[in-house]
Image (cartoon, rainbow, N blue to C red):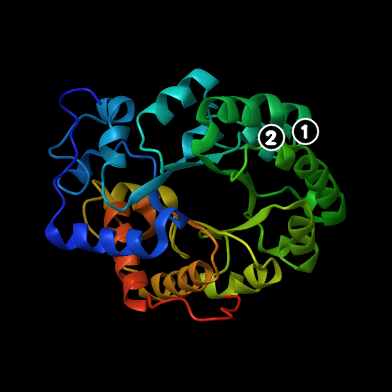
């Protein structure tokens, strides 16, 4: 960490909360945010405001010093996949128990090629769910660079065009072939996970595919997807296993709109108590059964990702009791 980007001093309540969670769950609980380059987190994560470019370049070590931040989602890998050297530099800035959630490149997970400026569909993507492209651009660099600090590699499937939605069986065949190659290529302890943005893809067929390949379903909380409670059948259908959740955007909101209205992301703008309660309950059940939890939260979920992380940790802390025998699926 360069001089000038320093961690905020945690208050006594935050330090005590983190200590209780660590004592109960050890290395199984990983909470964090989507990226870390936000000047508005001054006093929450940083000791003072910093330029976004400086935070992006030098802020990860300070972020990882926050008592609750034990993961981060590298969403930028979706657009510009880092090379192994970049991953290695990031890993070196984090403590041993820290784990990264990495989004696989859009070059693999988007069925169409898009205009970079508008996002408009241009043509079919010939590399959609291609195993060779996935290994070369997504798997090999992050495995080589992050090694044991790779927690989850997320294949977030962008909204599918009508052709693929009309033939979900063909899409699942291609996804299964990809996972057959990716899952064995990950280091011990790392997870391959799949997130979708089309509610119609949810169902027993997808759950069975993920379960059979040793991959996990991502509880993706986004405007396009059902609320958390409505996605619990997918978690039950793939139980037992680790929980991966990416809390990105509330239903009824638009990303660009809340980005502009909620900046600089220093306070909760739209607290979502229902989602937080559901997540805490699922996290509690997952941890009680001896599995791991990875939850990353975007500023656009409630207005300030660090404050959302703390509120979720407090909700889990309120539920926590010594694990009961025979914990059941969430």
Compared to 145, does 275 lie above or below? Answer: below
Separation (CA) of disc 1 from disc 2: 6 Å
Q: Which residue: 33% across, 62% down?
A: 23
Give the x, y percent position of residue 10.
16, 51
Compared to 137, does 169 lie above or below? Answer: below
Q: Quadrant of the N terminus?
A: top left
Look at mark 2 in the image and give the residue it sits on. Answer: 108
Please say whether residue 269 is visible from this viewpoint.
no
Which numbered tag is attached to residue 80?
Answer: none
Which of 221/254 is in front?
A: 221
Which of 322/274 is in front?
A: 322
Compared to 228, does 67 lie above or below? Answer: above
Q: Which residue: 77% across, 40% down?
A: 178
Q: Which residue: 64% across, 26% down?
A: 140
Give the x, y percent position of residue 271.
31, 68
Local crowd size for mark 2, using a 10 Å CA cut-off: few (<14), some (14–19), many (≥20)? many
Q: Quadrant of residue 196?
A: bottom right
**Left or right of residue 329: residue 127:** right
Q: Which residue: 48% across, 65% down?
A: 251
Give the x, y percent position of residue 291.
55, 62
Look at mark 1 in the image and give the residue it sits on. Answer: 130
Which of 279/300 is in front?
A: 279
The reply to whether dot 1 and dot 2 touch (C-beta < 8 Å) is yes
**Left or right of residue 204: residue 193:** left
Please say whether residue 162 is visible from this viewpoint.
yes
């Amino acid at each position: 960490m360069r001089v000038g980007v320093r961690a905020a001093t945690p208050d006594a309540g935050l330090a005590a909360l983190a200590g209780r969670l660590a004592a109960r769950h050890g290395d199984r609980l990983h909470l964090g945010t989507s990226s870390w380059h936000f000047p508005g987190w001054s006093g929450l994560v940083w000791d003072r405001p910093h330029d976004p470019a400086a935070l992006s370049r030098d802020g990860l070590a300070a972020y990882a010093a926050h008592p609750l931040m034990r993961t981060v989602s590298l969403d930028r890998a979706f657009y510009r996949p880092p090379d192994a050297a970049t991953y290695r530099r990031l890993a070196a800035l984090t403590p041993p128990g820290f784990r990264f959630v990495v989004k696989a490149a859009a070059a693999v997970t988007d069925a169409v090629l898009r205009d970079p400026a508008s996002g408009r569909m241009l043509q079919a993507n010939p590399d959609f769910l291609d195993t060779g492209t996935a290994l070369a651009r997504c798997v090999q660099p992050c495995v080589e660079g992050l090694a044991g600090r790779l927690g989850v590699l997320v294949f977030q499937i962008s909204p599918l065009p009508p052709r693929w939605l009309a033939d979900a069986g063909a899409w699942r065949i291609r996804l299964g072939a990809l996972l057959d190659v990716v899952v064995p290529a990950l280091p011990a302890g790392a997870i391959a996970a799949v997130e979708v943005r089309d509610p119609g893809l949810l169902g027993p067929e997808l759950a069975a595919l993920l379960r059979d390949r040793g991959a996990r379903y991502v509880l993706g909380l986004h405007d396009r997807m059902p609320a958390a409670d409505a996605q619990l059948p997918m978690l039950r259908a793939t139980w037992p296993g680790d929980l991966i959740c990416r809390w990105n955007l509330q239903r009824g909101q638009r990303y660009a709109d809340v980005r502009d209205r909620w900046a600089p992301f220093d306070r909760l703008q739209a607290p979502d108590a229902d989602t937080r309660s559901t997540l805490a309950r699922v996290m509690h059940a997952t941890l009680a059964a001896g599995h791991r939890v990875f939850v990353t939260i975007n500023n656009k979920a409630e207005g300030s990702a660090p404050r959302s992380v703390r509120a979720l940790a407090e909700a889990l802390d309120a539920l926590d009791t010594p694990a009961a025998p025979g914990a059941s699926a969430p």
